């Protein structure tokens, strides 16, 4: 369907990506309206109001309804739409079914003020539209200084410090929750990771590209669109070129000759869980020779070597095998999501996994995000720094607000605090001595009276 065949009778369908809240509307009015103009601004807001309550695509409306509400003709509608597209607020797709051709408008939230002013194109164009004085007023309105936080102590509570979950639900996620998570995962758009090239083993992309085109007729553009996903799977699971080519071929859309990202991710994860939980593969620890530091004991040095030499997936499998447990789907996804967000290098992420599994039977995404946020703020970039950060937390005076995790969620039996036991024994001994002294005094008093 080409644009020259676009008529008011063509249908449309609105697909939201996120939610438009009141803050977004303020940003739209202040920052986007001067660039969009009133017609594009009104069209964008109207499309958000036209999001269907139920997904019944056969009940879609025609563009004539939108044009009538906006009071504009086809040409002005098109010009308004492409303005919203150019600013990243709308993505437009063409599709056709038994009822005919129609457009799908995928709606996106506006940038945050920080993102907007940091974007050269957006901020410069706004400056040209509103002038210097108005631009300065808008910049001052949305500027937020963090200087007030200097020398302050954060006392914010973590999730598990406030809300208590049952151990059984935390370890074995209820079926309904799993189903809901899978549905949302399938419908959400994958965030493109920004990979740290230093952390990724070399991959022969030319080999993959050539074989994929020859064997499965997948277009190079489609392969490039999924390049970051493929690199992420390679870095996280340690997959080589031949394995990746085989998995892409088994999961691609053979009708359209396109890569299916969701099927590919599921296939890779299923393969990993099978290898880790059923046919347990032994890890041969090929450790890079590096100068060891005297700041860590032998046990810590061994963990550091493993963290540097294994992918996050294999490191998790090794730790689970060591404790006699197995890898659950939810924690595997949690670790993969964290790795693909690339907040931390793989070796640092492995240290995080090691710490959490020392204190809890499973990985949970909220706790991992809490630790990742803390480590980023403290510029933790190496596994040595991560291990030192953990040591600092453990050796500091006890403060429940600074704990990464909550002991109430542990399934394992708590270790005995021998210092308390000694104190208890000492107190009991003192009480016994006091009783003996009292008895001696009573005997002396009786003998004196006699």
Image: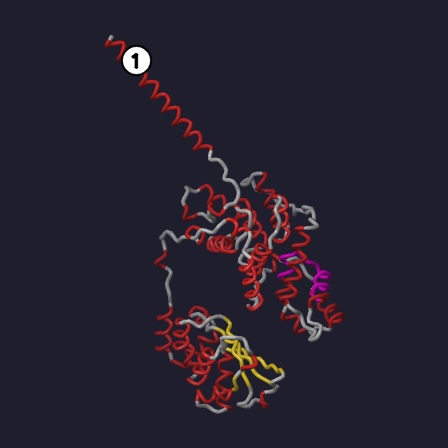
Residue 238 part of the magenta-drawn span: yes
- Position of residue 376 relative to residue 26, above or below, is above
At 56% from the left edge and 87% from the top edge, which residue is drawn?
10
Q: Taking 21 as reference, is 443 above or below it?
A: above
Q: Which residues are magenta?
A: 232-248
Q: Nearer the viewer, residue 153 or 25?
A: 25
Q: In the shown orientation, is residue 143 left or right of residue 204?
A: left
Q: Magenta-highlighted stretch: main secondary structure?
A: helix
Front one among 282 and 14: 14
Residue under label 1 = 443
Pick the front one: 344 or 89: 89
Q: Secondary structure at mark 1?
A: helix
Q: Quadrant of the C terminus?
A: top left
Badge 1: residue crowd in 10 Å (few <14, some 14–19, many ≥20): few
For residue 38, side relative to residue 215 (left or right): left
Where residue 65 appears, as percent x and y from the top left, is 48, 87
Give the answer, above or below, for where 103 lies relative to 153. below
Of all residues, the one furthest to the right in this rendering is 215
Quarter of the image that includes the N terminus: bottom right
Residue 198 drawn at (x, y percent): 61, 57
Q: Residue furthest left?
A: 449
The quadrant holding residue 247 is bottom right
Percent x, y for residue 258? 67, 72
Image coordinates for residue 298, horizontal then vertical, percent: 59, 38
Judging from the image, the colouring scheme is secondary structure
């Amino acid at each position: 369907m080409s644009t020259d065949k676009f008529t008011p009778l063509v249908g449309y369908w609105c697909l939201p990506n996120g939610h438009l809240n009141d803050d977004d509307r303020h940003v739209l009015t202040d920052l986007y309206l001067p660039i969009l103009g009133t017609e594009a601004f009104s069209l964008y807001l109207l499309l958000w109001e036209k999001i269907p309550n139920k997904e019944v695509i056969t009940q879609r409306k025609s563009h004539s309804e939108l044009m009538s509400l906006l009071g504009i003709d086809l040409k002005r509608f098109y010009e308004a739409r492409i303005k919203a597209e150019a600013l990243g607020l709308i993505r437009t797709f063409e599709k056709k079914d038994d009822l005919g051709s129609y457009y799908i408008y995928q709606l996106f939230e506006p940038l945050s003020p920080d993102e907007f002013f940091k974007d050269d194109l957006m901020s410069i164009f706004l400056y040209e539209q509103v002038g210097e004085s108005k631009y300065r007023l808008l910049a001052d309105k949305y500027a937020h200084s963090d200087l007030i936080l200097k020398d302050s102590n954060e006392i914010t509570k973590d999730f598990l410090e406030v809300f208590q979950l049952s151990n059984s639900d935390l370890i074995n996620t209820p079926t309904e929750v799993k189903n809901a998570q899978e549905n949302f995962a399938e419908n959400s758009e994958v965030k493109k990771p920004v990979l740290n090239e230093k952390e990724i083993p070399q991959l022969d992309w030319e080999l993959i590209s050539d074989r994929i085109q020859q064997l499965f007729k997948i277009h190079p553009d489609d392969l490039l669109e999924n390049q970051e996903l493929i690199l992420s799977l390679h870095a996280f699971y340690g997959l080589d070129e031949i394995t990746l080519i085989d998995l892409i071929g088994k999961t691609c859309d053979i009708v359209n000759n396109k890569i299916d990202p969701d099927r590919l991710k599921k296939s890779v994860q299923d393969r990993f869980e099978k290898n880790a939980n059923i046919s347990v593969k032994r890890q041969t620890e090929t450790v890079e020779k590096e100068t060891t530091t005297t700041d860590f004991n032998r046990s810590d040095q061994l963990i550091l070597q493993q963290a540097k030499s294994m992918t996050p997936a294999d490191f998790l499998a090794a730790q689970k095998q060591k404790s006699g447990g197995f890898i659950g789907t939810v924690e595997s996804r949690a670790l993969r999501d964290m790795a693909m967000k690339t907040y931390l290098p793989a070796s640092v992420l492995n240290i995080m996994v090691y710490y959490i599994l020392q204190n809890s039977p499973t990985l949970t995404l909220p706790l991992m995000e809490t630790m990742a946020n803390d480590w980023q703020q403290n510029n933790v970039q190496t596994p040595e720094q991560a291990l030192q950060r953990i040591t600092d937390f453990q050796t500091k005076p006890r403060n429940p607000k600074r704990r990464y995790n909550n002991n109430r969620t542990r399934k394992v039996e708590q270790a005995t605090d021998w210092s308390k036991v000694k104190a208890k024994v000492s107190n009991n001994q003192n009480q016994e001595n006091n009783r003996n002294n009292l008895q001696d005094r009573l005997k002396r008093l009786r003998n004196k009276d006699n």
